[in-house]
Image (spheres, helix red, strand yellow):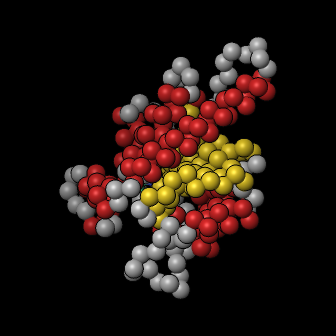
Amino acid sequence: MALSDFTGPDYIDAWAADLDRRWPERAAMVDCVVRTLVEWQDERRVRNLRQAGSREKKCHAVIRLLELGIGAGGLAEAVLDALVDASGEGSPDAVEYTGIDIEPALVSHGKERLMVAGHHDAHLIQADLKDGNWICGNGPFDAVYSLQTFHDLGGVEALETVYRQTHGLLAPGGVLVNADFVVPFEKDDPERPRRLPVETHQDLLSSLGYVDFKCKLRLGKIACMAARRP
Ligand SMILES: C[S@@+](CC[C@H](N)C(=O)[O-])C[C@H]1O[C@@H](n2cnc3c(N)ncnc32)[C@H](O)[C@@H]1O
């Protein structure tokens, strides 16, 4: 059901709860996205420490995050809590967050939710990922991630476009994490598939210059996939 099918003061929470009820594998996907980003952050810290030389005891760098299709903001909160915790000494300044969604109500909701959770500097933008404008003035980012959103963009060409745009926004060494449907629904038009197999994601990402593709988790109808910009 779409957000517009819900009414009442808590309609956004009701919509988000409905997504979790219909696809219970979402909880594991949230964990997988968070874990993948934390692992990437750890690896980056080790790399930075090595580059800074053995005399440096601490090495903090800002991590610039971009989330595409933020929904009710649950994943944003989980990611920010985990990365801020793991970023050493809990410095909130170490993580910069930008989130994009097409729905103005979700953008306002996300802003408020992250504010209440203590992530005061989160930057939320209302934009359509299907037009090219959302990339203007944004980036570079160290990590871009998304959950259950890219299938909404319309098919393989739209997926390729967003993967290309993301590649352009990522800093060298940056990571892309995408969890989405990888099996078709009965109602899908077989001529215009939009829930695409893992192999299609891997082929597109490789052809665009991403490296180190990994399918981190596959459960139910969803897979969590990661790749890096060299
Ligand atoms: C199924 S929801 C998933 C939301 C959130 N990522 C989650 O998993 O809880 C898909 C999200 O993508 C957003 N979305 C769909 N099409 C979009 C577009 N063209 N541009 C930006 N956001 C879009 C929707 O508004 C919605 O928030």
Rendered location of residue 195, percent (x, y): 50, 71
Q: Is residue 8 visible?
A: yes
Rendered location of residue 222, percent (x, y): 46, 61
| Quarter that holds the N terminus | bottom left
Looking at this view, is 39 or 88 the one in front?
39
In which quarter of the view is residue 208 placed?
bottom right
Q: Is residue 20 left or right of residue 132?
A: left
In which quarter of the view is residue 220 placed?
bottom left
Tell me which residue sits at (46%, 74%) in the image.
184
Instruction: Check the image and report above or below for 204 versus 92.
Output: below
How many marks the image carries: the answer is 0
Tell me which residue sits at (44%, 58%) in the image.
219
Rendered location of residue 72, percent (x, y): 37, 51
Tell me which residue sits at (53%, 19%) in the image.
89
Q: Quadrant of ligand 1?
A: bottom left
Instruction: Check the image and report above or below for 134 versus 32.
Output: below
Q: Is residue 108 visible?
A: no
Farthest bottom residue in view = 191
Q: Is residue 185 left or right of residue 166?
A: left
Tell me which residue sits at (55%, 74%) in the image.
155
